[in-house]
Image (cartoon, rainbow, N blue to C red):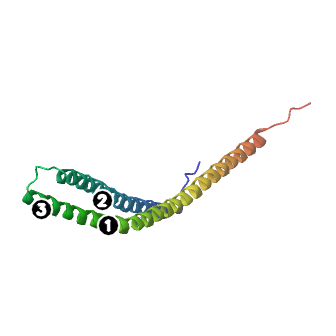
Amino acid sequence: MAQFKFKLEKVLEYRQRLEEEAMLAFSKARAELDGLKADRLRLRGEVAETDRNLCDPALTGADRWLQLSYRGALLEDIAFCDERVRLMEPEVERLRLELTEKAQERQLLEKLKEKQAERHLREEKQKEQREYDETATLRFRPQAV
């Protein structure tokens, strides 16, 4: 039986590599976005803690000023995180769509490969059956009556 050889194997390998690269880019962007969201959440918690500290009647004027300055810096950091998240979300979505497209292209070639392999197997079985039929026909000898 002849071995099946997919003529577009190199193209399939190339598309698999493109999909892996797209997956890596998406994963990195997604991790960065998740990190920014976690930082933003942590900073908001620190602002809440600072607000609680500002309510302490034992704070001196200098400590109050220090807490207010720290709170202002935290709010600036939150605004920076918000801006980065706003810019990263469309990029992550673009990378997700690109990954989906690359996966579909790879799957298309894999289905083609599967269908061609099935057709090849079917043709080989038919060829083998024809050979068996031919052999049986040649060896058949009618019985003398």
Q: Secondary structure at mark 3?
A: helix
Q: Quadrant of residue 91?
A: bottom left
First in sequence: mark 1 or mark 3?
3
Q: Quadrant of residue 85?
A: bottom left
User: How crowded is the residue under tag 1: few (<14 C-alpha within 10 Å), some, or many (20+)?
Assistant: some
Query: As displayed, is residue 6 above or below residue 94?
Result: above
* Horizontal side of residue 19 vs 109, given as left or right: left
Question: In the rendered image, which residue does mark 2 sit on?
Answer: 36
Residue situated furthest top in the rendering: 145
Amino acid at dot 2: Leu
Amino acid at dot 1: Arg
Question: In the rendered image, which residue does mark 3 sit on?
Answer: 65
Residue 113: percent from the left, percent from the top? 56, 56
Residue 45: percent from the left, percent from the top? 26, 52
How far apart are the alpha carbons under marks 3 and 2? 28 Å
Amino acid at dot 3: Trp
Total numbered circles: 3
Q: Residue at x 79, y 38 (%)?
A: 140
User: How crowded is the residue under tag 2: few (<14 C-alpha within 10 Å), some, or many (20+)?
Assistant: many
Query: As displayed, is residue 145 above or below residue 74?
Result: above
Q: Are marks 1 and 2 in contact (CB under 8 Å)?
A: yes
Q: Residue at x 22, y 54 (%)?
A: 51
Q: Residue at x 15, y 58 (%)?
A: 67
Q: Secondary structure at mark 2?
A: helix
Q: Secondary structure at mark 1?
A: helix
Question: In the rendered image, which residue does mark 1 sit on?
Answer: 84
Q: Are marks 1 and 3 in contact (CB under 8 Å)?
A: no
How far apart are the alpha carbons under marks 1 and 3? 29 Å
First in sequence: mark 1 or mark 2?
2
